[in-house]
Amino acid sequence: MKKKKKILILGGAGFIGFYLAKELEKKYNIVLIDDLSKNQKKIDNDLKKLIKKKNINFINKDITKTNLSEFPKNFDYIFDLAAILGVKKVIKESYITLKNNLKLTIKAIEIAKNQKNLKKVFFASSSEIYDGGGKTYKLRYPAKEFYPITINDLKHARTVYVTSKLTAEILYINSGLPYIIGRLHNIYGPRMGLSHVVPELISKFISKKKIVEVFSPNHSRTFCFYTDAIEIIKKLTLNSKIPKDIYNIGNPKNETKIRNLSFKISNFLKSKKKIKFVEDSHNSPSRRLPDMSKTNKFIKKTNYKNIEYGIEKTYLSIKFK
Ligand SMILES: NC(=O)c1ccc[n+]([C@@H]2O[C@H](COP(=O)([O-])OP(=O)(O)OC[C@H]3O[C@@H](n4cnc5c(N)ncnc54)[C@H](O)[C@@H]3O)[C@@H](O)[C@H]2O)c1
């Protein structure tokens, strides 16, 4: 019988890492490592079920505190997804975020370099990379991977997140590794926590509060349901013919203002609550829209789950948690 290939997922208990492991578990042997810092150190029922599978080995540990000798050297693929994220957390703990995210990237690269026959390492970067250049050069959306990048406001605490992603991209590019950098654009769905706009708004509409505050109503996004993102991440990384490079990952269709997103959620829930619109308070990007043509040269993806489908699935996961 052919031996199963081995995959390491850093940040494997998180939103994307969990679904990636679930998707790949039948064909690969998988090691997940995560310190559960996002989840208040708890292993939830979904994760408990997943890590019982015989092809999955879960290590509960802070990656920055691991030694290289703890890792086998026979991984075929590595997915580097571990990071501190979420606007409120990043702003509250800006110094720790930058320090830890950089340490995490350096450790991930060291682990990857230590492998005997690594085929690919995937790094999860962010659409936030485009915001500074978009504003400075009035670049036209959809955002293309070659657009110039600037970091505009060094003194805003939120800047640490984009700085960690940009530095990580440069580290990977210069690492000599067979990397795939994916710039993720608003991936959402069940089990992602409440710090993303879709689950956050749903939870506000079903909370006891009478008024729903909606921030940045005129900002626009395209929303990518997690199953579509997992499909792209998997195909980009596991296909040896796809060259090392930077690729956008997201839904290029149905750009929506946050205002309209809140109406869609309100209609879906048949909510009678009043909505109060509040202008941006966190220096958030006014637009996020990926140009998917470079990615589509290899992936050729045309069908994406629509937002109504995603709202329903996300709502059900929050309501019956
Ligand atoms: N979800 C999105 O829309 C989106 C958009 C852009 C970029 N990204 C990037 O994709 C990656 C995955 O995102 P996600 O939404 O799954 O986030 P997530 O927060 O659900 O997952 C990250 C995981 O990393 C773990 N982690 C953090 N520090 C760690 C440490 N020191 N040691 C071990 N584990 C640690 C956390 O506990 C968490 O489970 C992140 O790097 C994120 O920046 C996500």
Image: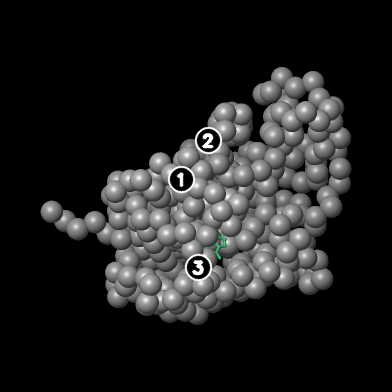
Mark 2 sits near ligand 1, with its Cβ under 8 Å away: no
Front residue of 97/134: it is: 97
Residue holding disc 3: 63
Query: Cα distance, mark 2 to mark 1?
Result: 24 Å
Question: Dot 2 surroundings within 10 Å: few (below 14), some, or many (20 or more)?
Answer: some
248 up-or-down from 101: above or below: above
Ligand 1 shows up in the quarter that is bottom right
**Separation (CA) of disc 3 from disc 2:** 34 Å
Q: For disc 3, does the CB lie below 8 Å from ligand 1?
A: yes
Give the distance between the C-alpha atoms of the residues marked 3 and 1, in whole angstroms.
18 Å
| 212, above or below 74, in the image | above
Which residue does the numbered mark 1 point to in the structure image? 47
Q: Which of pointers 3 and 2 lies earlier in the amino acid sequence?
A: 3
Of pointers 2 and 1, the one earlier in the residue sequence: 1
**Marks 3, 2: nearer the viewer:** 3
How packed is label 3: few (under 14 Cα within 10 Å), some, or many (20 or more)? many
Amino acid carrying label 1: it is: Leu
User: Residue 74 falls in which quadrant of the image?
Assistant: bottom left
Say how the picture is coloured: one colour
On-image quarter of the C terminus? top right
Circles 3 and 1: CB atoms closer than 8 Å: no
Residue at the spot x=51%, y=43% of the render?
A: 44
Q: Position of residue 270 (x, y in %)?
A: 71, 19
What residue is rendered at 30% in x and 75% in y?
116
Rendered view: 162 above or below 52? below
Q: Looking at the image, can residue 210 be seen? A: yes
- Cβ–Cβ under 8 Å for marks 3 and 2: no
Q: Is residue 138 visible?
A: no
Say which amino acid is labelled 3: Ile
From the image, tell me which residue sits under label 2. 305
Residue in the picture at 85% in, 38% down: 277
